[in-house]
Image (cartoon, coloured by chain):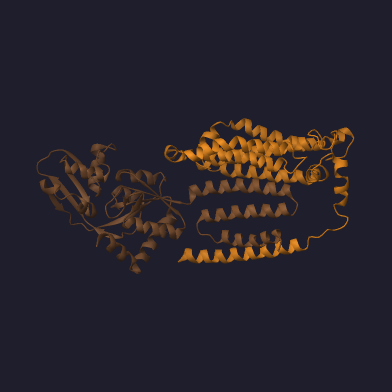
Chain colours: A orange, B brown
Amino acid sequence: MIVRKRLTVQNTIAVIVALIFLVVVLFSFSFIGRRPGAGEQFIRQGVEDTGAVNIVAAIYLNYRLFDTIFEILVFALAVIGVRFHLHAIKDKRPRLKEALFISESHIVRVAGDLLAPVVALIGLFLIVTGHLAPGGGFSGGALLGTVILLLAVARGGERVGRRLNEDVVDRLEQIFLVSIIALSALSPLFGRPFFANFFPLGEPGRLLSGGWILLYNLLIGGKVFIGIWVMMYCFIRHRGDV
Amino acid sequence: MTTLQGLLLLLPIIAIFALTRRRPLGAILGMGVFSLLLAGVYLLSHAPDVALVEVAVGAAFLAFYILAVRKKGKLMVIGDETPYLFYRKGEDVAGLEYEILRGFADKLGLDLEILFVPRQQVHKWLISEDADIGAGGVIPTTSEKSNLLISDGYLKTRLFHISSRSVDGRVAGISGSHALEEIENKNGMADPYAYFSDLCAGIDHGEIANCSVDLVRFIALDHQALTNYDIKRDSEDLCYVFTVSPGEKEIYEELNTYIKRLRSSGELDTIIARYLG
């Protein structure tokens, strides 16, 4: 049996990959120790330098914003890739199927309606308080994206997708991406080096503090949210379903 | 052993579980558990931000995967109810064909989904690729032979032409290429006897002038009601087959090898004996 043989080969590879993973994870964790010096400075001076209580946000949106910009570019590339490759497939709207299969069970629909606003609120909260507590643009944006997925599961992808004006969303996505990059390039105008914060730091612990971290979280959250939305809409349009 | 070490030991176990699943849904559930455990590891390593992202992204991708599997991980079977071969039994489906397809779907690691439609519509559903396999005592018509993939036969059968001595009514029929085409020309898609159960009722009430049915359906007809009819046995040797959607070449080939294996191992005879013996 060809299928059976292929499956056993697949299983062997799977087990080997998992074992390698086991070794790497266990060893990397056992080697973690406190390396004196590295990071000490950030921990001691982080709040003073950036005005953000959450030291992680301080590092990835202030000290190491340069790295974060490229992370955002990776996500933007993924969205572009999905759109580019799916556009090669011809439009395939649900036909006969829609009436029969999209109507989900009542429980799923009601649960989706109830959960969606709550999850959306949590996502917004994570984005807005990213500089004060764990959270931030990436996780908050991903949560907002799951709201759209939830609605697509509960009410049918086509119905959610119909609300979406493609041109506006495309434009919005570009605006978010460009403004993320442009904001960091504005620093020299205020007498600071590139990628350096030029907003007032504010009082640590207040909502309006931490310089531009709040603004960056909002921009990144919007970018991730719209990116997930665009990807989902592409899947609906060109595959007939999510 | 600390909680962190316990979680770390669990991770590869869950990973192996997820990677070796045959059914896509099991693998996805494994991945979900893995994602959750990994978030726990991050949290215990004092990285709540990363844990949050792991949970959010893990959940989002889980939904994507489940949606993808909902479409891809199904073997959509479509056909009319057929006595002995493919019929409803309470909430469930049973029959000879069902048993073959059940084993076939298990072998491919797909979920079997069944929709009952009239015999004449099977063709349309398969052409539009809304279904993968047509079942329900199929003897392929000429147009089906040229447009669809036809599997090997699994059971020999005959056609029976039934004509009424008294009634000059409608033409009906479920099987046989001539009968089906004739009906399509005469009644169109709105055939009142599209389902076999309707045909049975029609014969019981003596509404039907002419019809042709295949062997298992003929056995299942009420022979009390057939006393007013002339019955002619067709001499042509035919086979019951499965029709496969033209886009599903892989399923077609797998199905043929599966039927061949069932036959050579003698399993097919056991199943046939159970339902028709």
Q: Residue furthest right?
A: A191
- The N terminus of chain A appears in which quarter of the rendering? bottom left
Tell me: residue B218, above or below residue A212. below
Residue at 22%, 55% (x, y): give it.
B215
Q: Position of residue A58 (x, y in %)?
A: 81, 43
Q: Is residue A60 left or right of residue B184?
A: right
* Count of numbered marks: 0
Q: Nearer the viewer, residue B204 or B230?
A: B204
Residue A85 in sight: yes
Q: Is residue B193 left or right of residue A227?
A: left
Tell me: residue B113, above or below residue B208. below
Q: Is residue A42 left or right of residue A132?
A: right
Q: Nearer the viewer, residue A194 or B147?
A: A194
Q: Position of residue A74 (x, y in %)?
A: 70, 46
Residue at 25%, 47% (x, y): give it.
B174
Q: Is residue B173 left or right of residue A57?
A: left
Q: Position of residue B98 (x, y in %)?
A: 35, 55
Residue at 19%, 45% (x, y): give it.
B211
Q: Position of residue B78 (x, y in %)?
A: 36, 48
The image quarter containing residue B216 is: bottom left
Q: Nearer the viewer, residue B6 or B225?
A: B6
